Image (cartoon, rainbow, N blue to C red):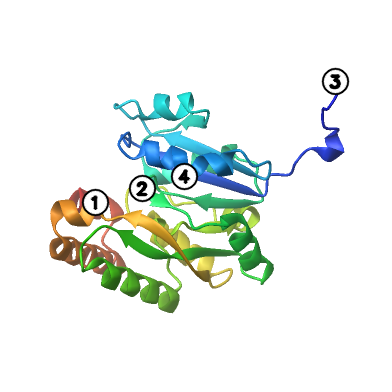
Amino acid sequence: MAGALSPLETPVVRLSIVVPLLNERTQLPRLIEHLTPLRDRDDCEILLVDGGSEDGSAELVAEAGFRVLTAPRGRALQMNAGAAASSGDTLLFLHADTRLPDNVLSLVERALADGKSWGRFDLRIGGDSFWFPMIAALINWRSCLTGIATGDQAMFVRRDVYEWVGGFPVQPLMEDIELSKRLRRHSRPACLRARAVTSGRRWQRYGVVRTILLMWRLRFDYWRGVPAKVLARRYE
């Protein structure tokens, strides 16, 4: 067929972006607008993995032309399913309420070319609370110090290393922290100064101070060995 690519000319997908979904319809118009330019690139693919949404999230993103998968409910299960179905050399895990920085592909490629096998972006929290810049600065500082990343920071990792550590651990909370611990055995993370912007909706809904105290307590208890299943009940 005229104009068709030969096998040798088939574009190579360098980055696979995996987005877990669960009843995120209110976030989806902005997410779709944000991801469409990346979806239209030959060297990037986007997989949205629905965990049983009841608000039409899966149908909405499918109508917008995105590839949608289904998986059992649970962020770790959904992200692992998306990774398994993807074809990129590098995986990036994105929350539905987080927006990536400009030139994300070149930023990730540069970080990995410098010898790192995984990394994350600095965080900015969207919203009008005067607490948010301080919270984001502390999260970024703690992440650089400890080598632990959170899901809001749009973690990325070479596929071979992701498979080497076994992917996300199947647990209902702290899956990003546990994955970071495993990846740290391979290399320290690339801590990119470019910022991913995440929604401050949870802090605003439940109160900034209350949410901070809750998260600190959950992390401390996880460090003490309290099972993630127990912590998930407190989080919800």
Amino acid, disc 4: His
In this picture, is 138 found above or below 27?
below
For mark 2, does the 10 Å Cα neighbourhood hold few (<14), some (14 to 19), or many (20 or more) residues?
Answer: many
**Proximity of marks 4 and 2: CB atoms separated by less than 8 Å:** no
| Numbered tag placed on residue 201 in the rendering | 1
**Proximity of marks 2 and 1: CB atoms separated by less than 8 Å:** yes
CA separation in Å, label 4 and label 2 = 11 Å
Is any atom of residue 78 visible in this view? Answer: no
**Proximity of marks 2 and 3: CB atoms separated by less than 8 Å:** no
Q: Which residue occupies 41% across, 72% down?
A: 143
Which quadrant of the rendered structure holds the N terminus?
A: top right
Mark nearer the N terminus (4 vs 2): 4
Quarter of the rendering containing residue 185? bottom right
Mark nearer the N terminus (2 vs 1): 2
- Left or right? Give the position of 233 relative to 160: left
For mark 1, does the 10 Å Cα neighbourhood hold few (<14), some (14 to 19), or many (20 or more) residues?
Answer: some
For mark 3, does the 10 Å Cα neighbourhood hold few (<14), some (14 to 19), or many (20 or more) residues?
Answer: few
Residue at mark 2:
97
Mark nearer the N terminus (1 vs 3): 3
Residue at mark 3:
1
Q: Which residue occupies 66% across, 71% down?
A: 115
Instruction: Determine the secondary structure under disc 4.
Output: helix
**Proximity of marks 4 and 1: CB atoms separated by less than 8 Å:** no
Residue 54 in the image, given as x and y percentages of width and height: 29, 26
Residue at mark 4:
34
| Numbered tag placed on residue 213 in the rendering | none
Amino acid, disc 2: Asp
